[in-house]
Amino acid sequence: MSRIARRFATLRAQGRGALIPYVEACDPDYDTSLAILRGMPAAGADLIEVGVPFSDPSADGPTIQKAALRGLKGGSTMKRVLEMVRAFRAGDDGTPIILMGYTNPIEAYGPERFCMDAKAAGVDGLIVVDMPPEEADLLAGPAAANGLDIIRLVAPTTPNARLPIVFNGASGFVYYVSITGVTGTRTASTDELAAALPRLRKATDLPIAIGFGIRTPELAANAVSVADAAVVASALLNTLEGTLDGDGKATAKTVPAVLEQLRGLAEAIHAVSKTGSK
Amino acid sequence: MSATDTQAGANSLRSGPDGRGRFGIFGGRFVAETLMPLLLELDAAYRTAQADPEFHRELDYYLKDYVGRPSPLWLARRMTEQLGGAKIYMKREELNHTGSHKLNNVMGQILLARRMGRTRIVAETGAGQHGVATATVCALFGMKCAIYMGATDVERQKPNVFRMRLLGAEVVPVTAGAGTLKDAMNEAMRDWVTNVHDTYFLVGTVAGPHPYPQMVRDFQSIIGVETREQIMAAEGRLPDAIVAAIGGGSNAMGIFHPFLDDPAVRLIGVEAAGCGLDSGRTAASIERGKPGVLHGNRTYLLQDDDGQITEAHSISAGLDYPGVGPEHSWLSDIGRAEYVGATDQEALDAFQLCTRTEGIIPALESAHAIAYAAKLAPTMGKDQIIVVNISGRGDKDIFTVAEHLGVKL
């Protein structure tokens, strides 16, 4: 059983939803992002997404775009991202790490070598934003060979007839992009979520995480009341950005502020009892 | 039907892309899941339209009476004499309404968008030629229009920005990145993903996710189809070489495609070498790039070793793009088309050569093609023929040119 599957099984047994925070590698520098990553499990993270900075994040809103640029300025390369995961893994064997990014840096690194090195570093799953099922063969073989989960995105625009195509080859969990739009903008309403989840449940037994637009503890609690996990990215990155000095450098406030916000989100999520639900 | 002829046989170089939208290893559909169902819908709608004679009747009507097709094939006598080699013909795409080849594609896609029931159009633009063409048809059909344009380009292409606004379009300056075409493309994609319910993304070049490279090529192929008929009428034979400028590559693909199965016709794409191919300030994606994935397709890209896209540079805003259409990448790899570079300075010189010898002020984009044709012609015999695609007119560029010539307007 993969680390991701194990973690969801444990949460289900405890009747809890999962909090999946996001940290952009090397934003604004390697040490700061590693300190945030290391602090996340104790602050309530159940799984963690590590963003791989890309120069052209066309599916992301302004917040993640800025974070990606800060990450690149902060020295991020694929090699450095994997180094960061390895450093984290040395002190934490239980929290699943999912890399989230775009196709080109993986293609440039070489898909086979990337999957091998990612696994060796302690990565558990991959979300490749611009790799729909139609292009998934680039990674499917090497990911499976190295036991990496491929987490598929599903959108409100995905028709029911297409769900089997999207879920074919998916593992770990499913990421529901709850709005049509870019990250960190609009938020899906409770009604929209309540309507969306049953059609996904019908098509997959995998845990479902909701992402895009989850900014507050209330919205996070709301998301896990219908789904299995909530992904929070832009809200944390906004907080991080707010603590930087005039030159965009980290300050003494940066790590504590992000983790403090994370604790608030975790409390709200973990207060939702999922006993009796799926 | 001829303009969108994709009925070529299996051994034809004109039969691509395959079912996955690939030309060899290039092309594909690398987009977020939110957009994937829309691309499938677009692909189906395009196939239906392509098979519908009524669609072609409608398109032909607008191409003739609104765009002003066919465009002439002009024998450039004085330039030919001055260069002292091959006979140079110019395909006069700058005479189309809105002053460039862009309207050929835009007219096809707007008719498709209307068939699909879309009411709002988003588009990216570099030099503003595609933006102006798009704003024009949106005015013609009474549709809402948002044009994303890099802030740097907004600054260097002011006349086109004003034109778009006059036509009723909202021009959105994009400050991300270097504020050029690549960043405008990202932002247009973000708008589309946000407004999928009513919005049609009108891509201006033969790049992006499938079916755009195929569709834009088909709509632009009218250039090559006419060229073929016109050169046969004028000379009774096909040309020895066809030369066209390449940014994303739509004017080149349009004139090349009907000649792909004629191996005797050299097809030469001229990329913007900027300050020189090895200066580090270039837009020559095929000559100096590596295959990678950006904006929905796999193609040659200017990028670093980590797969981060690097900024392109060209004096011409329309060529200032770190990628190129996937079909060009494929044609380069299989050796069917040649790709060369022309520098900023060579383009400026050619701009003046064309203006002074033919009385035609070409777009700086097209001046790159003229620059290479001017190098090539003297190496060829007087009985040989070169066709240069004059993809656009240069009125929009007079400020840039004046600045480089040290003239204050």
Image (cartoon, rainbow, N blue to C red):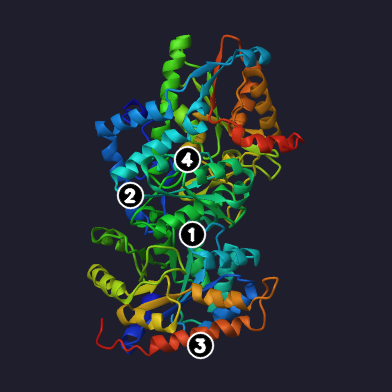
Chain for numbered disc 4: B
- Total tally of numbered discs in the picture: 4
The reply to the same-chain question for discs 4 and 3 is no
Residue type indicated by callout 2: Arg
The residue located at (42%, 58%) in the rendering is: A139
Label 2 secondary element = loop
Circle 4 residue = B205
Identity of the amino acid at label 4? Answer: Thr
State the mark number for residue A42.
3
Marks 3 and 2, Cα distance to the nearest angstrom?
49 Å
Instruction: Point out the frontmost of discs 2 and 1.
Output: 2
**What amino acid is labelled 3 in the image?**
Ala
In the rendered structure, the answer to whether residue B45 lies left or right of residue B249 reads left
Which mark sits nearer the N-terminus, 4 or 2? 2
| Residue ID for mark 1 | A102
Graded by Cα atoms within 10 Å as few (under 14), some (14 to 19) or many (20 or more), the crowding at tag 2 reads some
Q: Which mark is residue B118?
A: 2
Q: Residue A86: horizontal and vertical position, in percent?
A: 56, 74
Q: Secondary structure at mark 3?
A: helix
Which is more toward the observer, B6 or B18? B6
Q: Nearer the viewer, mark 3 or mark 2?
A: 2
